[in-house]
């Protein structure tokens, strides 16, 4: 196979249509002069997403982090929130921005999600919520988590930033828990440049969330909560409507790439791929592998560097763990001995390039480099 070392392969790349497809949307915005504040495209995207995803109520946001912050606020969460250290830092940051304390629980060694068996011993009289993450779009053990929550009178907010259109037995997992939060950042499976959303179960809750994202205004003259500006603008919403037409096709392309990686990497000593789980429709947003340096010739970081020398940019998601950032590491729950599995996975994990336009020959390059070091 020819090895064009100079071609840059990023870990992810947004899928864009031709710009001329977006022009009619822009012309409509220019004509209406309605740029934000629940405009026509905003309303249309909420409707289309609710139908597409199979969820009851959805409220759009300017990004996923503000959506996480508002989700906690909408449920009046206070005190302590049990969450996972194996996530993007925004998960824990949103808790601290609400003046709450994140309490880290260890993860499951197969799914890399918050391990339900580790949750109960972290519950104190201060605990009011659990914030699990569907890491790489792999669904959390919602039955266990929600049983624990019900028994202890806790709310459940899923950080579903990776879980766009993920289904279990044909049903959206975004309907789980009290609220689920999506991110539509440029690097995600469905993007609006920047963006996000909260999925909830009732019109009343959507109303509360919609007020919170609009400064707390109830009407023209009254503010009854400390809100924030979390509104998605019309350009973002219009772009979302265009993206939505292609997202299924793009997820299919991603699944083909994941299939190719898996077929070529599943029998490599020291490389562990994630097992496929029955009844789950994934979105293939990431392609994580674990590198075991005792069985493979390179450590994770050495493989990361080798790929980089070949202009292939993999990512160490999620390394460092949130609990190991200096802003969190002084918390008792952040100690390494309390989070053995998360620390072990964070040392081994590498996410390989995956995006709809990734070409077979580039996937071939990645595989060839990995296999050359068996
Ligand atoms: C991307 C991401 C976020 C943050 O979303 P933004 O839209 O970038 O603010 C939160 N949590 C997780 C797990 C993410 O991957």
Image (cartoon, rainbow, N blue to C red):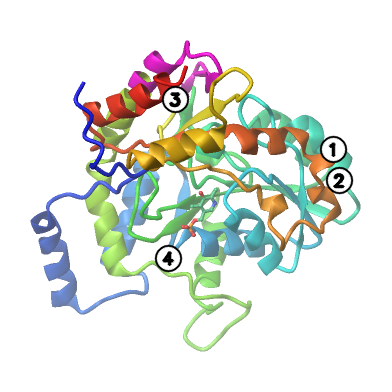
Check if residue 279 falls in the magenta segment.
Answer: yes
Q: Is residue 70 above or below residue 339?
A: below
Question: How far is disc 4 from disc 1 in space, using C-alphas?
Answer: 34 Å
Question: How far is disc 4 from disc 2 in space, using C-alphas?
Answer: 33 Å
**Tag 1 residue:** 120
**Tag 4 residue:** 62
Would residue 159 be visible to someone looking at this image?
yes
> Can you give x and y, in whole percent of width and height, for residue 97 in the image?
66, 68
Q: Looking at the rendering, which quadrant does residue 140 occupy?
A: top right
Q: Residues within 10 Å of mark 2 (few under 14, many from 20)?
A: many
Bounds of the magenta segment: 260-281
| Mark 4 or mark 2: whose residue is earlier in sequence | 4
Disc number lying in front (3 or 4)? 4
Q: Residues within 10 Å of mark 3 (few under 14, many from 20)?
A: few
Q: What label sits on residue 75 in the rendered view? A: none
Whether residues under marks 4 and 2 lie with C-beta atoms below 8 angstroms apart, the answer is no
Whether residues under marks 4 and 1 lie with C-beta atoms below 8 angstroms apart, the answer is no
């Amino acid at each position: 196979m020819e090895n064009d070392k100079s071609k840059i392969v990023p870990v992810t790349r947004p899928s864009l249509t031709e710009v001329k497809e977006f022009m009619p949307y822009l012309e409509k915005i220019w004509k209406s002069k309605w740029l934000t504040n629940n405009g026509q495209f905003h309303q249309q995207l909420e409707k289309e997403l609710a139908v597409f995803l199979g969820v009851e109520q959805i409220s759009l946001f300017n990004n996923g982090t503000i959506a996480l912050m508002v989700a906690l606020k909408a449920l009046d969460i206070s005190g302590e929130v049990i969450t996972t250290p194996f996530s993007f830092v925004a998960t824990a940051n949103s808790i601290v921005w609400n003046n709450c304390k994140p309490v880290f629980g260890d993860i499951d060694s197969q799914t890399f999600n918050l391990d339900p068996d580790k949750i109960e011993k972290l519950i104190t009289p201060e605990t009011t919520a659990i914030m699990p993450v569907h890491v790489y779009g792999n669904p959390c053990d919602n039955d266990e988590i929600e049983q624990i929550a019900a028994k202890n009178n806790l709310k459940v907010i899923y950080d579903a930033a990776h879980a766009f259109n993920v289904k279990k037995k044909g049903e959206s997992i975004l309907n789980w828990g009290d609220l689920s939060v999506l991110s539509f950042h440029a690097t995600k499976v469905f993007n609006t440049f920047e963006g996000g959303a909260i999925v909830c179960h009732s019109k009343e809750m959507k109303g509360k969330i919609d007020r919170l994202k609009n400064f707390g205004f109830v009407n023209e003259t009254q503010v009854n909560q400390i809100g924030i500006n979390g509104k998605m603008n019309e350009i973002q919403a219009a772009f979302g409507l265009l993206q939505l037409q292609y997202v299924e096709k793009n997820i299919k392309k991603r699944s083909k790439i994941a299939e190719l990686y898996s077929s070529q990497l599943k029998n490599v000593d020291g490389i562990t791929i994630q097992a496929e789980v029955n009844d789950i429709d994934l979105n293939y947003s990431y392609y994580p592998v674990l590198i075991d340096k005792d069985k493979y010739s390179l450590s994770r970081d050495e493989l990361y560097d080798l790929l980089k020398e070949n202009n292939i940019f993999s990512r160490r998601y999620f390394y460092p763990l949130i609990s190991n950032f200096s802003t969190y590491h002084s918390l008792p729950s952040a100690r390494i001995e309390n989070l053995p599995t998360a620390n072990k996975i964070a040392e081994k994990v590498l996410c390989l390039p995956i995006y709809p336009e990734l070409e077979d020959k580039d996937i071939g390059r990645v595989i060839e480099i990995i296999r050359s070091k068996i």
